[in-house]
């Protein structure tokens, strides 16, 4: 079973009330899978819709001009 949020971490234990744990204790690093408008955007913490290395390269290039 693939979980969208990894709940096997200490800050999300115990799993008595998962909704409360997500609202008050979870953060972006706990997200494993994201689906937007029926499209898989991130799976196993890997972004499926972008080339992350290319984005980092472009951001560094822009940062040099701005800074």
Image (cartoon, rainbow, N blue to C red):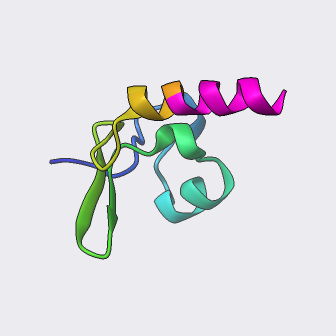
Instruction: Look at the picture and state if 11 lies above or below 16.
Output: above
In terms of image quadrants, where is residue 59?
top right
**View extreme (right): residue:** 67
Looking at the image, which residue is at 27% across and 45% down? 48
Picture coordinates of residue 34, whole percent (x, y): 35, 56
Residue 18 painted magenta: no
Above or below, 29 relative to 64: below
- Residue visible at 36% across and 43% down in the picture: 32
Q: Quadrant of the C terminus?
A: top right
Q: Is residue 14 visible?
A: yes
Q: Residue at x 41, y 30 (%)?
A: 54
Please tell me in which quadrant of the rendered image residue 7 appears.
top left
Residue drawn at x 32%, y 49% is 33
Placement of 39 over or under 18, stated as above or below: below
Tell me, yes or no, if residue 13 can be seen here: no
Q: Which residues are magenta?
A: 58-67
Quick one: 33 or 37, which is closer to the camera?
37
Percent of width and height locating residue 19: 52, 64
Residue situated in front as seen by the camera: 40 or 49? 49
């Amino acid at each position: 079973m693939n979980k969208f949020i990894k709940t096997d971490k200490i800050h999300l234990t115990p799993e008595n009330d998962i909704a409360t744990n997500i609202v008050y204790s979870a953060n972006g690093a706990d997200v494993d899978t994201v689906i937007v408008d029926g499209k898989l955007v991130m799976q196993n913490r890997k972004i499926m819709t972008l080339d992350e290395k290319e984005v980092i390269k472009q951001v560094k290039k822009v940062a040099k001009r701005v800074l």
